[in-house]
Amino acid sequence: MSSFLKVVWHHSYPDEPVWLYSELDDERYEVRKVEVYRDGRRVFADQVRSVGGSMLGEIPAPTILEFSDEFEDLEASEISEAEFESQWSATISGYGEIRE
């Protein structure tokens, strides 16, 4: 069963995303990911594509507790599937026809 994660990255780097949305599998590996930049640009990755420079993580995502303990510039929270799907749809729609 999937879980869904939102990470807010507090930084001032113009070429890095500030919001990251991930769908995680049972072992916390990313299945799909959306990255949103401060200027509104959106990129994404899933198990067969990497668009705009986004890539799935190669190791399991930290738990919410691990995020808060290890990364002071990252704010992570669990989100609903509906919230993730909304971000996913908004992102892939910006790339025209993309076959699943």
Image (tube, helix red, strand yellow):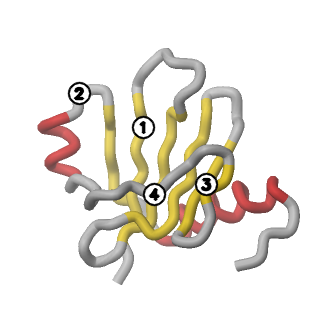
Please identify the residue farthest to the top as the structure is shown.
Answer: 12
Q: Where is residue 5 shown, x and y percent of the image?
A: 39, 57
Disc 1/disc 3 C-alpha distance (Å):
16 Å
Q: Quadrant of residue 28?
A: bottom left
Disc 2/disc 3 C-alpha distance (Å):
24 Å
Amino acid on which disc 3 is placed: Phe
Task: Tell me what residue is drawn at x 41 percent, y 60 percent.
Answer: 79
Disc 4/disc 3 C-alpha distance (Å):
9 Å
Query: Which residue is label 2 attached to?
Result: 72
Q: Where is residue 31 shown, x and y percent of the image?
A: 45, 69
Q: Residue 56 — which label? A: 4
Q: Of tags 1 and 3, which is closer to the observer?
A: 3
Q: Are marks 1 and 3 in contact (CB under 8 Å)?
A: no
Amino acid on which disc 2 is placed: Glu
Q: Are marks 4 and 3 in contact (CB under 8 Å)?
A: no
First reached walking from the N terminus: tag 2 or tag 1 = 1
Q: Is residue 74 above or below residue 15?
A: below
